Amino acid sequence: MSNSIQEIKKEVEGFVVSSETELETFRMRFISRKSVIGELFGNMKSVPAEERKAYGQDVNALKDLAEARFQFHIDNLKSGSKKVENHADLTLPPIEDHFGSIHPLTATRQRFIEIFERIGFNVSSGPEIEGDWYNFTALNFPENHPAREMQDTFFIEKNPDIALRTHTSSVQIRVMENEKPPIRTLSPGRVFRNEAISARAHCVFHQMEGLYIDKGVSFADLKQTLYHFAKEMYTKDTQVRFRPSYFPFTEPSAEIDISCQICHGEGCNICKYSGWVEIGGAGMVDPNVLENCGIDSTIYSGFAFGMGIERITMLRYGIKDLRLFTENDIRFLKQFSSL
Ligand SMILES: [Zn+2]
């Protein structure tokens, strides 16, 4: 038996097959027509006549061996995969799933929209970078109003002023400029103010503003709409109160308080032991604002309100620190995985 037949025999015997790929490698090397064994058959002619018979027998024996090993590996692979199936350990803990869930701020925004869609409001949006007209002037902000100052507003350019919007009231101006009353619209979105980050304030937060313009809209409509909102967002027994206030774009204006959802009037540190928590501001749209947008203020009137989605969410779920919303702490977010 020649050396190379001996070597190939050893190789066939020692070849380890533990996968389909290795099985194919085995087939290519020892079984196929172009395999090393096929080559040995091809060499037959060059073997001296007197040795040819013995050579032929050896090569045939090697071929039988390779085919037997090949079949063995096929059977082995099949039973191996069965073995794995049959021996799956059902007592092992399941592989943890990492499906995400809706962020609590998104859930509140969606609930907000649901409540107002049922009473005829649509949803509008606008740019986060605004010019002076949409963010301030059209909204009746006086030239020297502190909100225009550098310490409150993130300006991108001065003269002409371009800023990150400080509220979504800018969207309401765009809607009033482009649509005829009746207008019933919600403007949710991200807003920016130069404030120190704390448990109660952030320089980036989310607002939900509402606007209703039609003939004969009164403060009674505003109150009734916000009563409806508070009872739908929180509980049926939620109380609402209005405190007189001032905003450039509404007259008269009010701050909106609801009964504390944490202590239900008993007094706690969230409501500063008053039983009431502020959720936003509201008022009748100032006639100047209507006129700025080409709406005749002698025919039409309307109300507007604005609330922080963070604040509404904190009261909804009893969250005490606003920073949790943006810290991406899985331990916090996981608590809302059922939303
Ligand atoms: Zn309280």
Image (cartoon, helix red, strand yellow):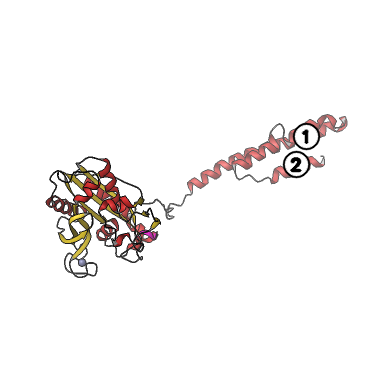
Q: Which mark is residue 278?
A: none
**Residue at the spot x=28%, y=49% of the render?**
187
Q: Are marks 1 and 2 in contact (CB under 8 Å)?
A: yes
Please tell me whether mark 1 sits on a helix, a strand or a loop. Answer: helix
- Residue 123 makes an appearance in the image: no
- Residue 311 is situated, as x and y percent measured from the top left of the image, at 27, 59
Q: Residues within 10 Å of mark 1 (few under 14, many from 20)?
A: some
Q: Nearer the viewer, residue 95 or 53?
A: 95
| Image quarter of the N terminus | top right
- Residue 3 makes an appearance in the image: yes
Left or right for 31, reference 114: right
- Assess whether residue 131 is covered by the magenta stretch: no
- The boundaries of the magenta stretch are 325-329
Q: Amino acid at mark 2?
A: Ile
- Residue 238 is situated, as x and y percent measured from the top left of the image, at 16, 58
**Residue at the spot x=72%, y=33% of the render?**
34
Please tell me whether mark 2 sits on a helix, a strand or a loop. Answer: helix
Provide the major secondary structure of the magenta segment. loop
Residue labelled 1 has its Cβ within 8 Å of some atom of ligand 1: no
Residue under label 2: 8
- Residue 8 is situated, as x and y percent measured from the top left of the image, at 75, 41
Q: Amino acid at mark 1?
A: Leu
Residue under label 1: 40
Q: Nearer the viewer, residue 210 or 44?
A: 210
Left or right for 164, reference 230: right
Residue labelled 2 has its Cβ within 8 Å of some atom of ligand 1: no
Q: Nearer the viewer, residue 112 or 78?
A: 112
Mark earlier in primary sequence (1, 2)? 2
Q: Quadrant of residue 72?
A: top right
Query: Which quadrant of the picture is home to ligand 1?
Result: bottom left
- Residue 85 is situated, as x and y percent measured from the top left of the image, at 49, 45
Distance of mark 1 from mark 2, alpha carbons?
10 Å
